[in-house]
Amino acid sequence: MGLNLKTVIGKTTFKNPVLVASGTFGHAKEFEKIIDLKKLGGIVTKTITLKPRLGNPPPRIVETPAGMLNAIGLQNPGVEKFIEEKLPYLKKIGIPIIVSVMGYSVEEFIEVVKRLEQESGVDGYELNLSCPNVGYGVRPLWITDSYPQGSDPKMFAHDSTLIETVVSAVRKVTTRTLIAKLGPDVSDIGAMALAAERAGADGISLINTFIAMVVDVKTKKPVLGNKTGGLSGPCVRPIAVRLVWEVYKKVKIPILGIGGIMKAHDALEFFIAGASVIQVGTANFMNPRASIEILDGLKSFMRTEKISNLKNIVGSLKT
Ligand SMILES: Cc1cc2nc3c(=O)[nH]c(=O)nc-3n(C[C@H](O)[C@H](O)[C@H](O)COP(=O)(O)O)c2cc1C
């Protein structure tokens, strides 16, 4: 049976809906001997910032029941070195490349995107509005120029006004596919997604990690050097599925579902809840072939169930 797995988001056509999530797949070369990269639906790069970042002090990773906590702190070479050293390899793969971008202000987001606009081989941008590991709550640079002076610093994804401000500003400088990556630690995810849609986003990625902490009971200190980190893996999946479903009910633009997807079965939960494509994250660390196995499993499910078009599964939740 011929299967149609194609999904269009913005200007990008993904030949299948299995992407790899930012920060969990290096810059792809690391996986070239393990999987056929061309088989992936697309790659979301590690988040790139304007200037290089060394990341947070170690320890940066700790295992948790059914998951992990990371506080890498957006270690990356900065946009210039990314263009020079990583992009040439990525664009040769021949699948959609979505560059994950973060700035400490609206202006910085724009600067990074404007620089990438000068390069070919970038299909779109995923705005990382929700990294939990970079000075959250302490560094005033999180505040945009337009944000009221004296307010507490905020993560962009925690405030619908900030989401709307940054997405609409970036929308003005690119016609490429623009995706807003939201965080899960909010009380009304629908309002955040609507703000991104209003501002011109072509898609919503969710979820990023949950802000969390593991304590060493002997030293009474947090285990991670950064004190808190981002929780990911199978433990977050049911919450992620619920958040995707809530957003699906609110917005018309496609959703890129992320959170603890280890197997095809997990990916199907996200499609049924309303995701048009999915991203594989933590699973890449446990099984570097996970993305391809998920794609194969999805195809065999569709054949067994006689579903020829992925679109017939998306948002098919019965309530
Ligand atoms: C080690 C690690 C590094 C990550 N780095 C980034 C990053 O640079 N940018 C980003 O948007 N998300 C980053 N994430 C979040 C993932 O892309 C994903 O949203 C999250 O882990 C939930 O999916 P999962 O449970 O499948 O891992 C990172 C996650 C992990 C585990």
Image (cartoon, rainbow, N blue to C red):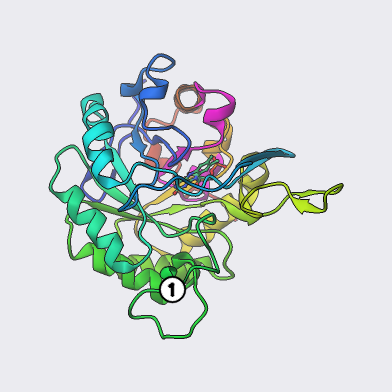
Return the residue nearer the eye: 200 or 54.
54
* Quarter of the rendering occupied by the C terminus: bottom right
Q: Is residue 129 magenta?
A: no
Return the residue nearer the eye: 296 or 185.
185
Return the residue nearer the eye: 136 or 207.
136
Judge: label 1 CB < 8 Å from ligand 1.
Answer: no
Left or right position of 252 against 305: left
Q: Residue at x 40, y 14 (%)?
A: 33
Q: Is residue 200 visible?
A: no
Q: Is residue 82 visible?
A: yes
Q: Residue at x 44, y 15 (%)?
A: 34
Magenta segment boundaries in residue numbering: 269-290
Amino acid type at mark 1: Ser
What is the x, y in percent for residue 143? 41, 73
Residue 44 location, quadrant: top left
Left or right position of 190 against 47: right
What is the x, y in percent for residue 156? 44, 67
Q: Residue at x 52, y 29 (%)?
A: 284
Q: Is residue 277 magenta?
A: yes
* Quarter of the rendering occupied by the N terminus: top left
Q: Residue at x 43, y 73 (%)?
A: 160
Q: Residue furthest bottom?
A: 149
What is the x, y in percent for residue 93? 25, 25
Please determine whether, in this image, residue 228 is positioned above or below residue 148: above
Please determine whether, in this image, residue 253 is positioned above or below residue 28: below
Please determine whether, in this image, residue 110 is positioned above or below residue 310: below
Please determine whether, in this image, residue 16 is positioned above or below residue 235: above
Please tell me how crowded label 1 is: few (under 14), some (14-19), or many (20+) other residues with Cα within 10 Å.
some
Element carrying mark 1: helix
What is the x, y in percent for residue 223? 72, 46
Q: Which residue is mark 1?
A: 160
Return the residue nearer the eye: 11 or 184.
184
